[in-house]
Image (spheres, rainbow, N blue to C red):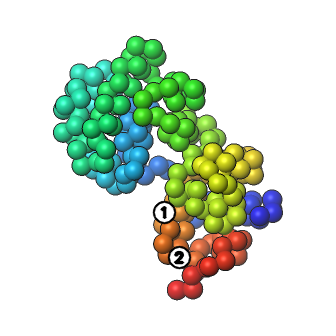
């Protein structure tokens, strides 16, 4: 995709969603870390359903540790892999208290050192909580980047690097949200809504749907 087309691609997505936001509910950087960690292999809707009651009681690492793993499981038992996720959330909360004064660090290495927090989660936290122009690549963004030809790559990291290189600086802050929402609601996995797509003329996908 040509540089001019990439700029147009983002401009059109921006026109549809001028102020995109995360669909995960969160209160502060800590609850965002927890929500994103819980969202692995789960839907945002399912995570929000569980974290709604949880975040009414727990909004800090100290409160999470006091809650304890067993009680945390009761809140998140509807989420896939909840046993492992509960263990990770308690441990990451302990690390935040012990090593970061109970605050969520603003650097990638420290975030990725937390249990259950990988590169994608770290990028989401840096972008959403701290306003860093990072691009977290999930399954939706991986699909959109490859299908459209925006930034093809065989791995999420390759796609991330491609997007970082090709996305104009003035679009980077919200690029993550525009791409994920486009993939979630328009450029769907099984049956993309090509007739409704605002960037269909820029897209390199050969099997475009007609209805």
Determine the secondary structure under disc 1: helix
Which mark is drawn over residue 96? none
> Residue visible at 52% across and 55% down?
139
192 lies above or below 46: below
Q: CA distance from mark 2 to mark 1?
A: 11 Å
Structural crowding at the residue carrying mark 1, measured as other residues with C-alpha within 10 Å and reported as few (<14), some (14–19) or many (≥20) = some
14 vs 187: above or below:
above
Task: Out of 94 and 200, give the one closest to the viewer.
Answer: 94
Q: Find residue 177 and report its horizontal and vertical position in percent.
A: 55, 52
Q: Are marks 2 and 1 in contact (CB under 8 Å)?
A: no
In which quadrant of the rendered view does residue 32 lie? Answer: top left
Residue at image location 49% in from the left, 75% down from the top? 191
Q: Quadrant of the N terminus?
A: bottom right
Q: Which residue is mark 1?
A: 184
Q: Is residue 170 visible?
A: no
Q: Position of residue 143 (x, y in %)?
A: 57, 61
Give the mark nearer the N terminus: 2 vs 1: 1
User: Dot 2, how many residues are within 10 Å of its Cα: few (below 14), some (14-19), or many (20+)?
Assistant: some
Where is residue 211 shown, x and y percent of the image? 52, 86
**Is residue 29 visible in this depiction of the protein?**
yes
Residue beneath disc 2: 193
Choose top left, top right, bottom left or bottom right for residue 71: top left
Q: Is residue 172 left or right of residue 90?
A: right
Horizontal arrangement in the rendering, residue 206 relative to residue 78 (left or right): right
Along the line of sight, the residue nearer the viewer: 84 or 73: 84
* Residue visible at 22% across and 40% down in the picture: 75
Most distant residue in the front direction: 154
Pick the residue in front: 69 or 16: 69
Query: Residue 119 placed where, x, y %?
Result: 55, 38
């Amino acid at each position: 995709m040509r540089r001019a087309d990439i700029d147009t691609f983002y401009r059109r997505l921006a026109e549809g969603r001028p102020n995109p936001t995360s669909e995960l509910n969160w209160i502060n950087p800590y609850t965002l870390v927890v929500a994103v960690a819980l969202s692995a292999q789960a839907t945002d809707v399912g995570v929000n359903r569980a974290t709604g009651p949880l975040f009414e009681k727990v909004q800090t690492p100290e409160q999470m540790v006091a809650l304890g793993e067993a009680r945390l499981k009761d809140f998140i038992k509807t989420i896939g892999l909840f046993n492992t996720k509960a263990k990770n959330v308690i441990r990451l909360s302990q690390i935040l208290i012990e090593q970061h004064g109970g605050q969520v660090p603003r650097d990638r290495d420290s975030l990725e050192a937390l249990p259950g927090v990988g590169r994608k989660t770290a990028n989401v936290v840096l972008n959403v909580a701290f306003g860093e122009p990072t691009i977290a690549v999930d399954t939706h963004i991986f699909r959109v980047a490859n299908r459209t030809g925006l930034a093809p790559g065989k791995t999420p990291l390759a796609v991330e690097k491609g997007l970082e290189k090709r996305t104009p600086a003035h679009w980077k802050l919200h690029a993550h949200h525009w791409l994920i929402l486009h993939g979630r609601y328009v450029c769907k996995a099984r049956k993309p809504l090509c007739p409704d797509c605002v960037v269909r003329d820029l897209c390199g996908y050969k099997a475009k749907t007609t209805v």
